[in-house]
Image (tube, coloured by chain):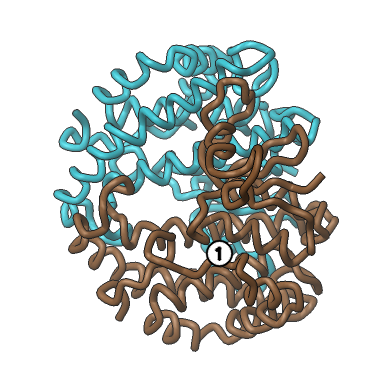
Chain colours: A cyan, B brown
């Protein structure tokens, strides 16, 4: 039975980190809210979130359904999928390290979201623009360089070389770091280019993942939603610099 | 060899979620940055973060050192400690569900932090007070009730009864939900009381954990740092209501 990925249609968002893992592994999956037909569509997604019959309800999309298992929280989904898709090392220490990196990527993603919604996630960007400009400035000046320096150090100190974050093979954390860099280039083209000059290993990893045959095929396909201003990474020129 | 917990001295912060697990299990541990003597103190903590010799450097405190293993990210630390301290079910499905709940608690904690630092985590609260008032209002009105309703539903739907979040025994997620409720009462006494009236199972869990003999002994000890305005949960009356 194919994996069911449930996420808002129309944006990459947090669902994209799961989608990239499924695509890179060549896994059989259905993107439920984007699919048509019986048991598909956004109604099917909302049913899982809202039905009192679901004993382990996800708080929010994305979530994964695999037979009777329902898993929410992006990092937890990847923790579950990693060994099944061959996208994480088998040892507990390496698996935990991969997860720790993933959680740090999730922290960056949350901070990127807050650059355009610093006051209220439920209100329009236009209603919190001055605060967004201030928060984005702090993110570009303080947070982005600090996070990238950490990823760079992780790559530099990998005893198996700097091609991958953990060990000598592709993991879901590499795919997520690729996606993070993609998003940074979209949302903060000037600041990202400047900051990434000091993180050559992160840049090389991004380029390496982009050349992965299944990832490259996915990125060129219609399954890859384009970045847009409903997602987490938004190209608002006033937030870059 | 005792576990080494590394966290900022002087605040509960994210370290408290780990501390509660260690205390509830009666584990042998050293609170390194608060300890004195050779190899202790805040210098020992900073060394792990800053030394280029650490191959798997944590991005930030808290982190745990267990022999050669170093684990950062609160939820990852609990994922590691859970089975070792008997604070999580053995089955993969239940363990993953516990972790998913923990990650959702982490999301609430991050949002609570942003109520007093919506614009810049590196700047003073006083310099972002109007934005904090706006963000805290959104948190109290929209986010807090939504999160508490979810925890209430998780308890209500637990097939083993509503005493614990997962199954019929205490897990690290129960301890963390206790701590979250403690913090909400401190930071938002009015809003928390109002919101918790609609979450009686969450209230009962909080009271139940507080009576756990080792937890109760810990809370009464000097090891429990008092809430204060350097931590994540801060009692700023203008942010409550």
The structure residue drawn at horizontal position 62% and vertical position 79%, both measured from the top left corner, is: B206
Q: Chain of mark 1?
A: A
Q: Nearer the viewer, residue B240 or B157?
A: B240
The structure residue drawn at horizontal position 14% and vertical position 49%, both measured from the top left corner, is: A130
Tally of marks: 1
Percent x, y of residue B4:
69, 46
Q: Nearer the viewer, residue B70 or A138?
A: B70
Percent x, y of residue A154:
56, 23
Q: Nearer the viewer, residue A117 or A59?
A: A117
Which residue is outermost to the front? B37
The structure residue drawn at horizontal position 73% and vertical position 53%, both measured from the top left corner, is: B29
Query: Quick check: A64 left or right of B59?
Result: right
The structure residue drawn at horizontal position 25% and vertical position 45%, both measured from the top left corner, is: A135
Question: In the rendered view of the protein, which quadrant contains the C terminus of chain B?
Answer: bottom left
Q: Is residue A203 visible?
A: yes
Q: Nearer the viewer, residue B152 or B67?
A: B67
Q: Is residue A5 visible?
A: no
What residue did someone put label 1 on?
A49
For mark 1, does the 10 Å Cα neighbourhood hold few (<14), some (14 to 19), or many (20 or more) residues? some
Query: Quick check: A172 left or right of B235?
Result: right
Percent x, y of residue A35:
53, 46
Question: In the rendered view of the protein, which quadrant contains the N terminus of chain B?
Answer: top right
Percent x, y of residue A39:
60, 56
Instruction: Determine the secondary structure under disc 1.
Output: helix
Quadrant of the rendered structure where residue A172 is? top right
């Amino acid at each position: 039975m194919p994996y069911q990925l449930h996420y808002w249609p129309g944006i990459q968002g947090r669902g994209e980190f799961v989608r990239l893992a499924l695509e890179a592994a060549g896994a059989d999956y259905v993107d439920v809210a984007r699919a048509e037909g019986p048991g598909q569509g956004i109604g099917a997604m909302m049913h899982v979130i809202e039905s009192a019959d679901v004993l382990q309800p996800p708080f929010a999309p994305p979530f994964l359904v695999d037979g009777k298992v329902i898993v929410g929280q992006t990092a937890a989904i990847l923790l579950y999928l990693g060994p099944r898709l061959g996208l994480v090392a088998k040892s507990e220490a390496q698996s935990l390290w991969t997860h720790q990196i993933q959680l740090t990527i999730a922290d960056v993603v949350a901070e990127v979201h807050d650059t355009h919604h610093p006051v209220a996630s439920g209100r329009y960007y236009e209603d919190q623009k001055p605060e967004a400009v201030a928060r984005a400035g702090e993110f570009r000046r303080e947070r982005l360089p600090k996070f990238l320096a950490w990823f760079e150090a992780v790559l530099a100190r990998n005893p198996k070389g700097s091609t991958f974050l953990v060990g000598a093979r592709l993991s879901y954390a590499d795919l997520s770091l690729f996606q993070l860099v993609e998003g940074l280039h979209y949302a903060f083209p000037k600041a990202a280019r400047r900051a990434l000059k000091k993180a050559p290993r992160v840049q090389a990893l991004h380029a390496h993942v982009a050349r992965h045959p299944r990832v490259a095929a996915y990125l060129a396909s219609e399954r890859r939603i384009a970045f847009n201003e409903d997602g987490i990474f938004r190209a608002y020129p006033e937030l870059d610099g």
